Amino acid sequence: MADAQEMNIRRRTLLSAGLAAGTLASAVLLGPANPAVAAKGAPSGVDSNGFREAGLPISRGRAGAWTETPVGFAGVASQGRAGTTGGTGGRLVHASTPEELRVFAKSPEPLVVILHGELVFAEYEKLTVTSNKSLLGAGEGAAVVNAGFKLVNVANVVFRNFTVRDSYIPGDFVGKRPDNDRDGIQMDTSTHVWVDHLHFTRLGDGLVDIRKDCDNVTLSWNVFSDHNKALGEGWTQNVVTRLTLHHNWIRNTHQRNASLDNTAASHVYNNYLENISSYGMLGRNAALLLVEGNYFRDVRNPLHHQGPGGALVARNNLFEKCTGNTGQERGIAFDVPYSYDLTPTKAVPALVRAFGGPLGGTEPALREVITVALDGTGDFARNRAAVGAIPTNNPTAVTVLLQPGVYHEPSVIWGDRRNITLAGATGNAGDVVLSNSEGVTLLVAADGSVLRDLTVTSDVPQSGHVLLITGRGVTRSNVTVLNGTAG
């Protein structure tokens, strides 16, 4: 009975999102989910993968959103390992405080660590994670706040079902301050890492950095949102790294979505990218890319390859309301050494929106007023985060109220957020300044937007637009434009 009820809920969710029943069946997502099962003969919580104890649903079939093993390079046997199992076979422990998580993550023994609730760090930390670890969020609502994870020369690590959020340093959108190395996950020279159903948002530096000759990495069913730099791979001249990115949802970001430098094999399939203001997927130098079945919506320069060498093979990708580069093919990529099922590209947005990220979803709740303040007293500390907190196709008007300060970031009111008022809180245009180092500082693509009581400028004088309006029915009052033009 419970299985049938869950199946009907999942069916309604996806059908309401626009997927036909035939598409759902072909994607193997209408069958009921199974709980994970402990290893045969083992007591509960011992010698298991921990999925049952964490309350994770396990889907039938390779194409299911929740699988017991990774699809992609993290599941490929190499370097003496059959695949990625994390802490399976080790003790199962529970972390409800930052101190418990800190201790368990760096323990030398294999562990399955179940995270409970929100673990809020008073000061930012990048937690050391050692080999043979599974970090699993328990049910809905698990989060690591103002912290990230560091993997250096380790192997066999699994992250599943929690949020990593809010380590942003106000005013440092570009992430260049000397004290800002606030990644969500940083991997250096590590292998067999599976990152699945996480949500990374509003961090200080990169959401995920895969660096210095890592290998056998899969990022699947994650959500990357409301940030500057999403996913970067490289920091080395060696052509070693093999990674798979599939069924991820990347939204309201600026650059590195992903940036793939000198990868021996990057298999990027069935991802959904929307509302991206600089560039989407970029292959660099000797990187070999196979990019297939991805859906790009409102993305600037969605797909490109640059630098000497490398290859880009692009198949069955869809581009909606995109501008710039859309993937000129070059060279021959690689043969994929594992089995995988492609979701029909048209079905990707609804599928990823329904099942991406941790349990409980990542869609923001509608609110009438969102405050932005650099001193931490507002709901958020940057405009991009505030816009990301507005649901797409919002049914009612929303006011984003900016407290005094200089907001140094490229700001966008996306076309799917209608009737947004962006206003300075004091009524004095000089108190609230939007600036940027190059290009357009504020793009207003949404119909019915209102701009009020603020200054839009650039760090240096430029001949082009610093304020660009493409939406219909946009009104301005008490808006000062400096160091550029408005159009």
Image: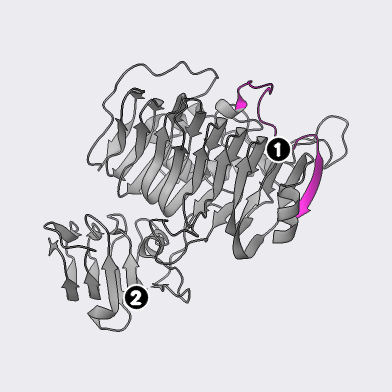
Q: Quadrant of the C terminus?
A: bottom left
Q: Which residue is mark 2?
A: 405
Q: Disc 2 marks which amino acid?
A: Gly
Residue 86 is situated, as x and y percent measured from the top left of the image, at 70, 36
Residue sitting at 56 percent across and 36 percent down?
65
Query: How many marks on residues?
Result: 2
Residue sitting at 48 percent across and 33 percent down?
246
Q: Quadrant of the N terminus?
A: top right
Q: Nearer the viewer, residue 183 or 358?
A: 183
Tell me which segment is drawn in magenta.
75-97
Tell me if mark 2 has few (under 14), some (14-19) or many (20+) residues whose alpha carbon lies within 10 angstroms of its own: some
Secondary structure of residue under mark 1:
loop
- Gap between marks 2 and 1 measured at Cα: 44 Å
Q: Disc 1 marks which amino acid?
A: Ser
Residue 340 appears left or right of 16: right
Mark 2 or mark 1: whose residue is earlier in sequence: 1
Q: Which residue is mark 1?
A: 131
